[in-house]
């Protein structure tokens, strides 16, 4: 009889642990959201620079021909 009660107790304990961890999730503030937007903008700009560089290289290869 003790085995099923141990399983129930373990299940309840795990449920409490999971719920507790979910409740502690940190919410983003306005500065963190702004930082993420800046990161996205910088990443996008970097991709555009790489694309432009590739186009310049392609144009230079074509000019050599």
Image (cartoon, helix red, strand yellow):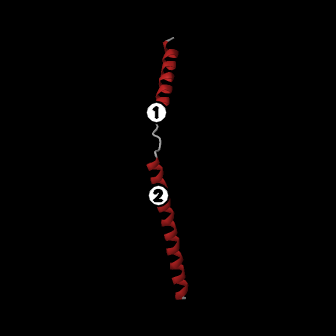
- Residue 59: x and y in percent read 54, 82
Q: Which mark is residue 21?
A: 1
Q: CA distance from mark 1 to mark 2?
A: 29 Å
Residue at 45%, 39% in the rendered image = 26
In what element is the residue under mark 1? helix
Residue 41: x %, y % from top left = 49, 61
Q: Secondary structure at mark 2?
A: helix
Give me the residue at 48% from left, 32% from top.
23
Q: Nearer the viewer, residue 53 or 39?
A: 39
Question: In the displayed image of the protein, which residue is found farthest to the top?
Answer: 1
In percent of width and height, residue 29 lies at 46, 45
Find the residue positioned furthest to the front. 30
Given residues 2 and 51, the one toward you in this image is: 51
Residue 22 against residue 35 in the figure, above or below: above
- Assess whether mark 2 and mark 1 are in contact (beta carbons under 8 angstroms): no
Crowdedness near tag 1: few (<14), some (14–19) or many (≥20) residues, C-alpha within 10 Å: few
Pick the front one: 34 or 18: 34
Q: Which residue is mark 2?
A: 38
Q: Is residue 65 above or below residue 4?
A: below
The residue at the point 44 percent across, 49 percent down is 31
Viewport quadrant of the C terminus: bottom right
Question: Quick check: 13 above or below 50?
Answer: above
Q: Position of residue 32 (x, y in %)?
A: 45, 49
């Amino acid at each position: 009889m003790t085995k099923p009660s141990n399983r129930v107790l373990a299940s309840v304990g795990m449920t409490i642990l999971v719920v507790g961890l979910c409740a502690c999730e940190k919410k983003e503030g306005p500065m963190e959201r702004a930082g993420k937007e800046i990161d996205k903008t910088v990443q996008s700009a970097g991709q555009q620079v790489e694309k432009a560089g590739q186009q310049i290289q392609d144009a230079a290869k074509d000019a050599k021909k």
